Image (cartoon, helix red, strand yellow):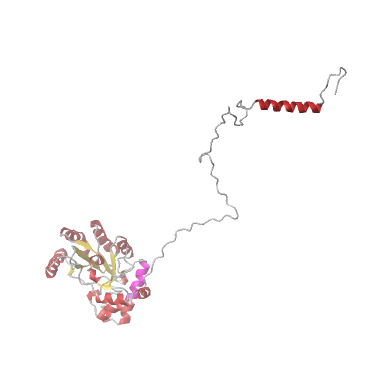
Amino acid sequence: MSNENNTPQLSRRDFIKLAGLSVGVLLESCVGRKIIGDGGPYFTPSPRLKPTEEDIPTKTPVETKNSIFTATSPPTETPIPHYSSETLKQIVTSEESSFLADHKIARGDPSRSFVIMTYDDGHDDQDVQKIIDAYDNHGVKCTFFFTGDKLEKCAKSINLAIESGHEIGCHAYHHDPPLVQLSGSQIQKQFEGFFTVMDQIAPGYRVRLWRAPYGAINDKSIKIIADYGLQHVLWNVESGGVQPETFQILFTNYDLAARYYRTPNGLIVLSHAQRYYDINIVNEVVSEFINRGLTPVTVSEGMKPEDKWENTFSVNP
């Protein structure tokens, strides 16, 4: 394209092409001058920083309709066992029953410096509480034998005794008449009644020991009651508990028994949880035994190893 003086004129299309070519030449001339990073011989590329773990955001899982979540189950509570008379007859084997009937506990382990302290006939929560407090203050233990007809009156102290590590035994349901005067079915009814109430006031606690009222037993009663997993406990020393001289009577009798058995260890003491002097001198009695080097313990703790039913016998926690 030309003007009147024949000077060449650029068309609009040619001008655009020429402008694009000029830009290309300019870019090409910049190679190696650190303007364009093509890796040429004079070019030092800028370091590329690798992101660290801290720089990488953590993605929060998003629940979708197809997501599968494992639900955390709430902790399950261990069911409390119940020791009714029917349950006990089911879990006590004939072998265990025969063993318990043949191993009446007449004396504790003579090889250890223990005295086995037992209390019959708790009638009142406050009286039983005094005995528990005295033993707890000295850090020692004892065993209580309750009749079934007094369990509800002493429910609070029975549970306190269990929590403190003392032991609960059975003293029949009624104290009278003596078991030796009852028929087999009457004996069973006594112990069925005891376990029914005991399971209500202290569920989960299994009673494993019993003492006959007056200590009156015969083969019939021993065998019937062993079917409930109960082992009979006798005694070697009695305190009396009804005279002001109860303290002196108890330790006079204890010294006589120690001479008879040729050791003070492992003797079983019988006191009563409803007799005035047995209740009110309990602290002095416990202190005296400790001063003599004898630790008061429960029946289960102080019994002879050969009298324990090895397969199933264990003290309730």
Toward the viewer: 306 or 288? 306
Residue 281, compared with residue 177, is above or below; it is: above
Residue 82, compared with residue 69, is above or below; it is: below
In the picture, residue 243 is in which quadrant? bottom left
Tally of marks: 0
In the rendered image, which quarter contains the C terminus? bottom left
Residue 177, compared with residue 10, is above or below; it is: below
Quick check: can you spot residue 247?
Answer: yes
Q: Main secondary structure of the magenta part?
A: helix
Residue 107 in picture, x, y percent from top left: 20, 70
The outermost residue toward the front is 41
The outermost residue toward the bottom is 183
- In reply to whether residue 197 is colored magenta, the answer given is yes
Residue 94 in picture, x, y percent from top left: 32, 77
Magenta range: 191-201
Residue 312 in picture, x, y percent from top left: 31, 70
- In reply to whether residue 198 is colored magenta, the answer given is yes
Toward the viewer: 85 or 306? 306
Residue 81 in picture, x, y percent from top left: 38, 67
